[in-house]
């Protein structure tokens, strides 16, 4: 039987979880008469001990070796250098490989270039895992663009900041709330990208790019940090019927685009107000349909890997439809 070959770039927490999903859910699956196999996995250290069973996997320290013979390239590079990730993905699409991405920073910085290359080479570039965790936002954006103009996308897209502010609204100080987020695995030892708004910035740029067709320069947008907020600030907002949330908003007025990232008081009856913990909400405003809201877990290995798995299924269906499960 012909095989559809998957290659992984990276096997960290998300990549390992995705590998488990593939083993558990796609073993024995046939797409258009073809089976599925994980071909090669690029890792920086092939001797490193892994928490998943790697028997049967071919590990390589040469990423181009992983790309060369694959049909689908799955990018799970995590915090690796964005330029390297871009170069590897460009190499993949130029060899007409379908690509599934997880690196939001790479996509935000080089989205225009990557999308252009994929369109030019006639291959797919899937990105659902880069924004919103378990929210299937890419399919929503693709379908909305058929009938109307997207004029605004807003909401809460950084789970770490939202969890911290949720803890602070209960009376915790910033440092205690940060430690809580770190203990739960939602904040890094260096939480700068989350608490200073950079993670939300990358996601907002991606949403603007795919939702509005405009790829903004990340360096031209200055996000606001949550570091200087205190529990007293949140209590004061509460007394005035507001709650402080880590908001993002991208807007389009004609050919002009704007972006805001940072903490902002929202009314307690706002659709954003009840979104707590590691949850995200993305609201898309269409010229014909008005606001449509999408809610779900915004962080964690399982929601992110689940989004990548959904991208994989869509890619397989496009390549080998019909399928037999």
Image (cartoon, rainbow, N blue to C red):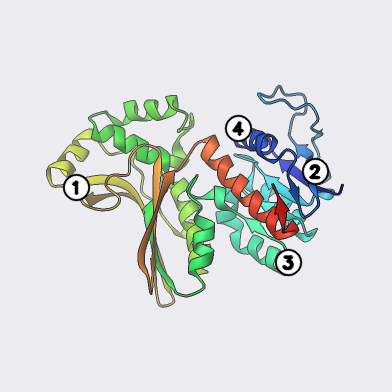
Q: In which quarter of the image is residue 119?
A: bottom right
Report how far apart the C-alphas of labels 3 and 4 lie in the structure: 31 Å
Q: Earlier in the sequence, mark 1 or mark 2?
A: 2
In the depicted structure, whether residue 76 falls above or below residue 292: above
Report how far apart the C-alphas of labels 1 and 3 lie in the structure: 48 Å
Report how far apart the C-alphas of labels 2 and 3 lie in the structure: 21 Å
Question: Is 169 on the left-hand or right-hand side of 112?
Answer: left
Residue 242 marker = 1
Quickly name the residue at label 2. Answer: 66
Q: Earlier in the sequence, mark 3 or mark 4?
A: 4
Please, what secondary structure does the residue beneath circle 3 have?
A: loop
Could you tell me which residue is drawn at 87 percent across and 47 percent down? 1
Residue 122 marker = 3
Q: Which of marks 1 and 4 is nearer the N terminus?
A: 4
Q: Badges 1 and 4: C-beta atoms under 8 Å apart?
A: no
Answer few, some or many: residues within 10 Å of disc 1's Cα (few below 14, many 20 plus, some between 14 and 19). some
Query: How far across and how far down the image is residue 108, in percent?
Result: 55, 55
Query: How far across and how far down the image is residue 23, in percent?
Result: 70, 35
Residue 24 marker = none
Answer few, some or many: residues within 10 Å of disc 4's Cα (few below 14, many 20 plus, some between 14 and 19). some
Quickly name the residue at label 4. Answer: 13
Residue placed furthest toward the top: 49
């Amino acid at each position: 039987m012909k095989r559809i070959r998957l290659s992984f770039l990276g096997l960290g927490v998300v990549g390992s979880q995705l590998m488990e999903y593939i083993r558990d859910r796609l073993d024995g699956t046939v797409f258009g008469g073809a089976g599925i196999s994980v071909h090669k996995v690029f890792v920086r250290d092939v001797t490193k001990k892994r928490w998943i069973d790697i028997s049967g996997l071919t590990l390589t320290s040469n990423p181009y070796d992983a790309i060369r013979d694959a049909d689908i390239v799955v990018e799970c590079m995590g915090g690796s250098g964005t330029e390297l990730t871009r170069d590897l993905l460009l190499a993949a699409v130029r060899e007409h490989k379908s690509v599934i991405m997880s690196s939001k920073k790479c996509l935000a910085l080089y989205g225009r270039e990557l999308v252009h290359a994929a369109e030019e080479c006639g291959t797919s570039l899937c990105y659902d895992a880069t924004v919103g965790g378990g929210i299937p936002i890419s399919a929503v954006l693709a379908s909305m663009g058929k009938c109307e103009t997207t004029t605004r996308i807003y909401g809460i897209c950084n789970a770490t900041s939202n969890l911290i502010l949720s803890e602070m609204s209960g009376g915790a100080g910033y440092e205690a709330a940060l430690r809580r987020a770190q203990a739960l695995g939602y904040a890094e030892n260096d939480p700068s990208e989350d608490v200073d708004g950079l993670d939300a910035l990358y996601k907002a740029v991606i949403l603007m790019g795919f939702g509005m067709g405009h790829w903004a320069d990340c360096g031209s947008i200055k996000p606001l940090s949550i570091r200087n907020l205190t529990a007293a600030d949140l209590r004061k907002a509460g007394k005035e019927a507001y709650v402080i949330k880590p908001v993002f908003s991208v807007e389009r007025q004609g050919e002009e685009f704007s972006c805001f990232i940072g903490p902002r008081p929202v009314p307690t009856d706002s659709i954003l107000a009840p979104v707590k913990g590691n949850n995200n909400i993305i609201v898309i405003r269409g010229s014909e349909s008005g606001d449509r809201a999408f809610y779900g877990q915004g962080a964690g290995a399982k929601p992110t890997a689940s989004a990548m798995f959904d991208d994989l299924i869509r890619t397989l269906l496009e390549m080998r439809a019909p399928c037999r499960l």
